[in-house]
Amino acid sequence: NETCSCMQARIIELLYDQSNIKDVLKRENFRFYTTKYYSSEPLPDRNGESPFSIAEKACRRAWDFVHHFADRSDNLFITGATGTGKTFLSNCIAEEVLNAGYSVIYLSAVRLFELLADETFGKTDSQNRNRDELHLHLYTCDLLIIDDLGTEITNSFTQSALFHCVNERLLRNRHTIISTNLSIEQISYHYSERVFSRIMENYQYIELLGSDIRISKKMEE
């Protein structure tokens, strides 16, 4: 009555195919994670902490999220400027969760709201069925990663859709990771007090600071 190792491997392979980030995770995972691009210079407004020490703390919190994935309903709100490693850290977590046999869906915020808009405003029976199936996957997958929140056009629909998605997953005790350039205070301004309240109460806050790592890597070439 137990799943054999080969069947488990096939399940994990299928989960990778469904996650939207199969190829990306070959190069963005904890085996390639490094803090060498973060400055060790203390920040005057952070009690002596540096971008380097903050990134190390973020990595430890990411591992804690992975290690307690099965026994806690944690969620992460990862914020920072462009190129500070938010998406990379999310992908590191995604690979570990997928390898453990859990379902992961990765979507950019733009793509998430495009899908929800297409399905929400569909009028045919087929579109309604697709909408129900999409919503089921978004609300029930073990981990949903919403990347680059704030890059989409914000309007009353996106505000309502984000609240509904966040709230439904909380009610179902499903894990969610949100990465964004916005501060948590800006979330209140762009997406309403209701979304701000849910995130403040139910998400762990991770901030990454420093210069654009992509530019630093490019300069090494």
Image: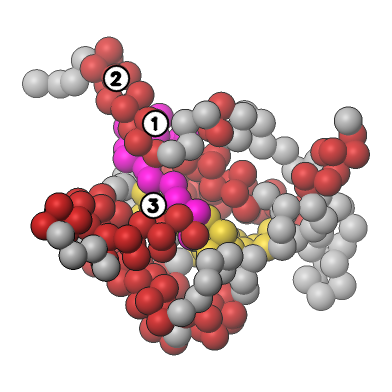
Q: Secondary structure at mark 3?
A: strand
- Tell me the residue that label 3 is attached to: 144
Instruction: Give the label on residue 16, or none.
Output: 1
Q: Sequence order check: which comes first, mark 3 or mark 1?
A: 1
Callout 2 touching callout 1 (CB < 8 Å): no
| Vertical side of 169 occupied by 71: above or below | above
Residue farthest top in this picture = 6
Q: Sequence order check: which comes first, mark 2 or mark 1?
A: 2
Q: Is residue 148 magenta?
A: no
Residue at screen point 41% across, 73% down: 158
Q: Is residue 102 magenta?
A: yes
Q: Position of residue 159 (x, y in %)?
A: 41, 77
Q: Amino acid at mark 1?
A: Tyr
| Magenta span | 95-109
Front position in the image: 117 or 213: 117
> Dot 1: few (<14), some (14–19), or many (≥20) neighbours within 10 Å?
many
Q: Amino acid at mark 2?
A: Arg
Front position in the image: 31 or 61: 31
Colouring rule applied to residues: secondary structure
> Is residue 136 visible in this depiction of the protein?
no
Q: Quadrant of the N terminus?
A: top left
Asked where in the image residue 209 lies, by quadrant, the reply is bottom right
> Is residue 116 visible in this depiction of the protein?
yes
Q: Amino acid at mark 3?
A: Leu
Residue at screen point 79% across, 52% down: 212
Q: Position of residue 104 (x, y in %)?
A: 37, 43
CA–CA distance in space, label 2 to label 1: 10 Å
Q: Position of residue 65 (x, y in %)?
A: 46, 49
Residue farthest front in this picture = 124
CA–CA distance in space, label 3 to label 2: 21 Å
- Tell me the residue that label 2 is attached to: 10
